Image (tube, grey):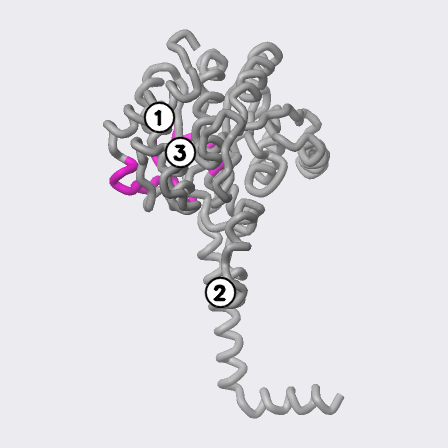
Amino acid sequence: MQALTATRSFFLQNPKTIAAVTLTGVGLFGLKKWMAGGVCRSKARLDGKTVLITGANTGIGKETAIDLARRGARVILACRDMDRANKAAEEIKKKSGNNNVVVKKLDLASLQSVRLFAKDVGANEERLDVLINNAGVMCCPQWKTEDGFDMQFGVNHLGHFLLTNLLLDLLKQSAPSRIVNVSSLAHERGQINFDDINQEKNYNPWRSYSQSKLANVLFTRELAKRLQDTGVTTYSLHPGVIRTELGRHFLPTIALWRRALYTPFSFFIKNPTEGAQTTIYCAVEESLQKESGLYYSDCARKATAPQGRDDEAAKKLWDLSASMVGLTQSQ
């Protein structure tokens, strides 16, 4: 009691101090709100429409699923871990009030799994209105996919490249429809190493990740060209810096003293709901219907790095990717 009385007395005698503390608090929360970025304001409904989201059992993928389910969509969670996916599906149903949420197994590190998944969707789904390529791996060790590709390039780009192409007929039949590719600001530091696409000569986790995120941007750009006049539009985006499981391979590599320095700044990092806003925006915002092949951040159109606008590299990457996944003209 004496301590509380002394504290109260101090602030009464020092009004400038309490004003400074108040302003500091307001400033910190204002900065946090600013760091949270844009919010999707669209009220668009998705009743009767089908949305497919890869990696939707956690992080921004799950938050995206909750939002789109609330809008009335049939939501397909495409996930590798079925136990976690089924638990996420129950949570999404409960939070959204929409029971039309289904789980299908997809391992983007396996081309066979991608093909089987796409065959299942094609045989059992009448339509596909929005495809959200959200799943990803970040800064993992030098792992390989089932088919021998660099894990980050294989999962973040090649798996989604094949999946998207195999689902194009259904997307075209459902037009107007959208393809949303979750990229990253990391694409600005990326280069496509055509001479060593699997990073075998000198592997660096960040270089591999940045290459895969640049590939997302270039894929979106080239795909838009190929889908002109089909009613299918494409979008790539940076979701922001977010507290999710994506950094599980990266964080352990940081020295403890560095992590201690970063800890205070975690207050300003986006949570998954905030991080999902630009994905949702690209999926539902009505004003984007006539835009395609562009890049977005904080629910607004943004310019990519110069290498993200290299049409020659985008075409070369498409041809290389098609060769790597065994995509034929008839598929």
Residue sitting at the far front: 201
Query: Mark 3: few, some, or many residues within 10 Å (few <14, many ≥20)?
Result: many
* Nearer mark to the viewer, of 1 and 3: 3
Among the two numbered marks 1 and 3 on one chain, the one whose residue lies closer to the N terminus: 3
- Secondary structure found at label 3: loop
Label 2 and label 1: CA atoms lie apart by 45 Å
What is the quadrant of residue 229 in the picture?
Answer: top left
Q: Is residue 95 left or right of residue 21?
A: right
Q: Is residue 302 left or right of residue 277?
A: left
Q: Amino acid at mark 1?
A: Lys
Residue range of the region highlighted in magenta in the rendering: 279-308
Quadrant the C terminus occupies: top left
Label 2 and label 3: CA atoms lie apart by 30 Å
Q: Amino acid at mark 2?
A: Arg
Mark 2 lies on residue: 258
Residue 198 tag number: 3
Q: Please provide percent x and percent y for residue 162.
A: 46, 21
Label 1 and label 3: CA atoms lie apart by 35 Å
Q: Amino acid at mark 3?
A: Asn
Mark 1 lies on residue: 290
Q: Is residue 301 left or right of residue 256?
A: left
Is there any visible trace of residue 134 in the rendered image? yes
Of residue 179 and residue 175, the one placed in the foreground of this image is 179
Q: Is residue 80 left or right of residue 187?
A: right
Q: Residue at x 69, y 36 (%)?
A: 84
Q: Is residue 29 above or below residue 18?
A: above
